[in-house]
Structures are given as C-alpha cells and as structure tokens.
Image (cartoon, rainbow, N blue to C red):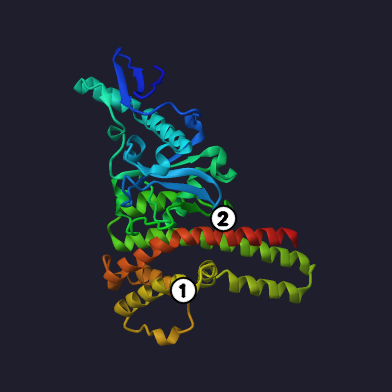
C-alpha cells in the first residue's frame, strides 16, 4: 500500500492485513518535497552531538546541500531557533522521515502484527545512538551522485563514522567535534583508481577485528593495492620511454634500470606515502619505531635517520610476515600503529588518488 502523509499527524499506510499504521511526524507538509531517489542518506554513529546541535553540510564551502542531525532533532520542536522554521531544514527533515518510513516499513508491519501496536515514532526506526547525514542529490557533485560511497573515506577523515552494524562502533577515532558548526566536505575526491573494497575494509571488516596483527594486515591490503597501482603507472611511464627510445640500446637500458628502481616494493610504498607531509605521518613513524625496537634486537633507528614513515611501515610488515613468532599478535605498540593507520589511511586514499589523477593527466598531455 502507498504511504500517505497527514499534515501535523504523520505518515500512514494500510498493511496487507488491513491494519492502519501510523508513524508520527507532527509537522506541516513542506512546500517542496524531496523524493527518496533525490535523497542520499548515511547512518552514522552519534559522535556525541546533542539534539540541539544540527550541522548544515556544504561542499567546498558552498551553499547548504545537506544536514548532519539526530533523529530527535527531526521530530522535536526544541531545536535552535534558526532551524525551527527554516524551510530548507524542514524539507530535509521531512525527506529523512520519509526515508526512514520506507526503510523500516516491513519491520514496523511485523511489530504491529506481533504486538498489536499501530502507532510508531521515528525513534522506533533507528537506534538513538545513531545520527543521520542527508544530502540533496541534485546539489551534490556529479561523482557523488553516481557513487555516494566515494564519500565514506572522506567522512572518516572528518570523524564521521558510517554505521554498518555494531562492529563499526569499534573504530578507534575520537568522536566528531565541530566548532565551526558546519560540516564542510572537500570534493577533491578522485575516482581514478578508487577501489570499492576500501570501504568494505574500512567500515565492515577492520572494525570487526580484535586481533591487532590481523588488523594491521587488513590496513596493509589497502596500501598493497595502491602499490599495485604504482607498479601499473610505473610500467606505463617506462613503456612510453621505450617507445621514445626508438631502438637506442643505451636509452632502452636506462629505461629498464629506471623501472627496476621505481618498481621495487620499498620504492612503491615510499611513493604512496610521499603524498602526505612528514608532520602528518610523524605519529605513525614513532609508533612503528617503538614496535621495531621492542621486537628486533638488531634494529637501530640511528641507521635509518633519514627514512620516512613508509620505510618503517614496510619494516613492520616484514616483521609480521617473516618473524611473527617474535612479534606476536596482540602487541601494545602494534595497536598504536593501527590507531595511527586508522587516521591516515582514509586521507592516503584521497591524496594518493589525487596524485595519480594529476600524473595521468600530465602523462596524456606529454
């Protein structure tokens, strides 16, 4: 049966048994309504923002195109005055309410049958620990319209943690805090080389893992995928050089030697981490050094004073692969490395993707 909206009452429909079911939403019908297909919605962990804290969402500091809000903010009149009668907010709140009805219609009908309960609130549709991020699709960048999940690593860098079940709560990152009172999303989100399984690892598999060694291994799978991309890009460059050599033996030899240098695993991981500044990687570097000092008696940091974080991440990987008996599984320093990777990997995905995209454009021009 279709869902009807009764102004100042709520959403009402009749189930297959002929029962009338109501989800209360005691506000007027907005003048402009967003259809479910025009509404991008992410469920998020609440991130400690209260009912009174509603955040407009912008892309690149532009106009408001969405909202970060709690369920209670949608159905309450006790919200900041600037939003209480804001038509844009009311349009978005109505659309999210309608979205929750659509998503939970079958569940609510089952509850109605089992408990003879036919009136519900939005709180019956979603855990109160959760928040919602809603974006009006026509105002979103084209690449987000096509693939909203491109936003997930970007949300993680902002401290906004997508809800994909209880396991996703295990993410270690601190709760979202925003003094600016606006969630601004930078749209330098490259599609070039983006792997959908990044999102699965970051929000579904990694948070569900308790074993620290296995968690590091999963983070390293993302790094390793980027290393494959570096290998592919390096091969393209060398093939272009070989074509330009036109049979010149010396030039061909130089090109092959160049490929040998830039295609090694250590060179590739350095290439990846080079897109982040030294300051951004400082904590990761220190936690890797602490781990290596605790598991490898022959390790001496003084011998690697000029090396960056990539070098030490690679050495941690080698310890876990080749000397697991010494490193062990649940190691305190390794847990800190994972915490640092949790913060850095989503940024690395975007910065490395942007770098690849720029290099691909440059290569095509040449």
Q: Is residue 315 above or below residue 343?
A: below
**Number of other residues with Cα within 10 Å of mark 1, as a class: few under 14, some 14 to 19, many 20 or more:** few
Helix, strand or loop under label 2: loop
Question: Disc 1 and disc 2: Cα gap in Å?
Answer: 21 Å
Q: Position of residue 237 (x, y in %)?
A: 67, 64
Number of numbered discs: 2
**Upstream in sequence: badge 1 or badge 2:** 2
Q: Position of residue 120 (x, y in %)?
A: 27, 27
Q: Is residue 209 left or right of residue 90?
A: left
Q: Which mark is residue 142?
A: none
Going 50% across and 58% down the picture, which residue do you hit? 349
Q: In the picture, residue 359 is in which quadrant? A: bottom right
Residue projecting furthest to the front: 81
Asked whether the viewer can see residue 232, the reply is no
Q: Label 1: which residue?
A: 279
Q: Which mark is residue 188?
A: 2
Image quarter (top left, top right, bottom left or bottom right) of the N terminus:
top left
> Which residue is nearer to you in this view: 142 or 29?
29
Going 57% across and 54% down the picture, which residue do you hit? 190
Q: Position of residue 182 (x, y in %)?
A: 45, 52
Asked whether the viewer can see residue 157, the reply is yes
**Number of other residues with Cα within 10 Å of mark 2, as a class: few under 14, some 14 to 19, many 20 or more:** few
Q: Is residue 114 above or below residue 257?
A: above
Residue projecting furthest to the bottom: 302
């Amino acid at each position: 049966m279709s869902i009807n909206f009764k102004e100042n009452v709520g959403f009402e429909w009749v189930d297959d048994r002929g029962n009338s079911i109501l989800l209360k939403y005691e506000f007027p019908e907005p003048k402009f309504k967003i259809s479910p297909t025009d509404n991008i919605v992410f469920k998020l962990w609440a991130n400690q923002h209260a009912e009174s804290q509603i955040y407009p969402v912008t892309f690149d500091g532009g106009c408001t195109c969405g909202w970060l809000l709690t369920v209670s903010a949608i159905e309450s009149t006790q919200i900041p005055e600037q939003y209480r009668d804001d038509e844009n907010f009311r349009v978005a709140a109505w659309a999210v309410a309608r979205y929750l009805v659509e998503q939970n219609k079958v569940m609510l009908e089952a509850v109605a049958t089992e408990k003879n309960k036919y009136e519900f609130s939005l709180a019956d549709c979603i855990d109160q620990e959760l928040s919602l991020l809603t974006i009006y699709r026509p105002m979103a960048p084209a690449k987000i319209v096509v693939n909203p999940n491109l936003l997930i690593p970007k949300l993680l860098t902002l401290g906004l943690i997508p809800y994909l079940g209880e396991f996703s709560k295990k993410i270690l990152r601190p709760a979202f805090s925003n003094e600016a009172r606006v969630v601004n999303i930078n749209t330098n989100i490259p599609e070039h080389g983006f792997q959908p399984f990044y999102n699965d690892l970051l929000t579904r598999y990694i948070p569900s893992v308790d074993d620290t060694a296995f968690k590091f291994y999963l983070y390293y799978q993302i790094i390793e995928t980027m290393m494959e991309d570096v290998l592919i890009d390096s091969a393209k460059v060398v093939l272009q050089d070989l074509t330009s050599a036109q049979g010149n033996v010396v030039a061909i030899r130089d090109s092959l030697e160049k490929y040998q240098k830039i295609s090694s695993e250590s060179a590739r991981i350095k290439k990846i981490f080079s897109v982040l500044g030294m300051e951004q990687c400082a904590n990761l570097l220190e936690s890797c050094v602490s781990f290596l000092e605790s598991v490898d008696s022959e390790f001496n940091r003084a011998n690697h004073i000029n090396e960056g974080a990539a070098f030490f991440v690679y050495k941690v990987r080698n310890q876990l692969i080749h000397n697991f008996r010494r490193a062990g599984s649940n190691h305190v320093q390794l847990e800190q490395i994972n915490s640092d990777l949790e913060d850095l990997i989503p940024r690395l995905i975007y910065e490395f993707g942007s770098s690849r995209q720029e290099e691909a454009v440059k290569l095509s021009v040449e």
